[in-house]
Image: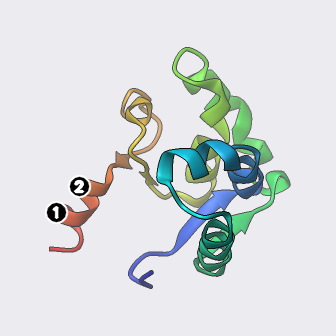
Amino acid sequence: MSDTFDLFVPEFSFTEIIKYEEVILKKSGMAKDNLELLLLLLQSHISVIPFKKIFDFLEEAEKEMEKIDIKDAPFIALALKLKIPIWSNDLHFKKQRKVKSFNTAEILSDFLS
């Protein structure tokens, strides 16, 4: 947890994490209590942006992501709205051309070294 970056997510992001809680627990080996604490910590460092704030950019984002992964269009819409890049290790963000994206290795080498 660092204040080096301002971090933002669309409002459904934490709901999605809860939706896949069992998968996350199984893959991570984390105890449920620890995951809940981690989510609280993350929520204190990440700004959640309401859907209505990115709605005007959603059509453009969906068009860009329709053949890549339409479910991630809200992240593109958010990046377009705020004029910021995306930080994700999901390779499909590199396939779109609307916003710059960085993976963790790139963040570490380009911004934190």
Left or right of 1? Residue 77 is: right
Q: In the picture, which quadrant includes the N terminus?
A: bottom left
Helix, strand or loop at label 1? It is helix
Left or right of 107? Residue 31 is: right
Q: In the picture, which quadrant includes the C terminus?
A: bottom left
| Residue identified by numbered label 1 | 109
Amino acid type at circle 1 is Ser
Asked if marks 1 and 2 touch (Cβ < 8 Å), the reply is yes
Work out whether residue 24 or residue 39 is closer to the camera in this orientation and state it: 24
Q: Dot 2 surroundings within 10 Å: few (below 14), some, or many (20 or more)?
A: few
Who's the residue at 68% across and 46% down the image?
22
| Residue 64, image x, y percentages | 56, 25
| Residue 93, image x, y percentages | 43, 35
89 over 49 or under it: above or below: above
| Residue 2, image x, y percentages | 42, 83
Q: Residue furthest top?
A: 67
Work out whether residue 24 or residue 85 is closer to the camera in this orientation and state it: 24
Work out whether residue 52 or residue 103 is closer to the camera in this orientation and state it: 103
Q: How many marks?
A: 2
| Residue 39, image x, y percentages | 65, 69
Amino acid type at circle 2 is Ala
Left or right of 70? Residue 90 is: left
Helix, strand or loop at label 2? It is helix
Alpha carbon distance from label 1 to label 2: 6 Å
108 over 78 or under it: above or below: below
Who's the residue at 23% across and 65% down the image?
108
Who's the residue at 66% across and 31% down the image?
71
Numbered label attached to residue 105: 2
Q: Residue furthest right?
A: 52
Q: How is the image coloured?
A: rainbow
Numbered label attached to residue 89: none
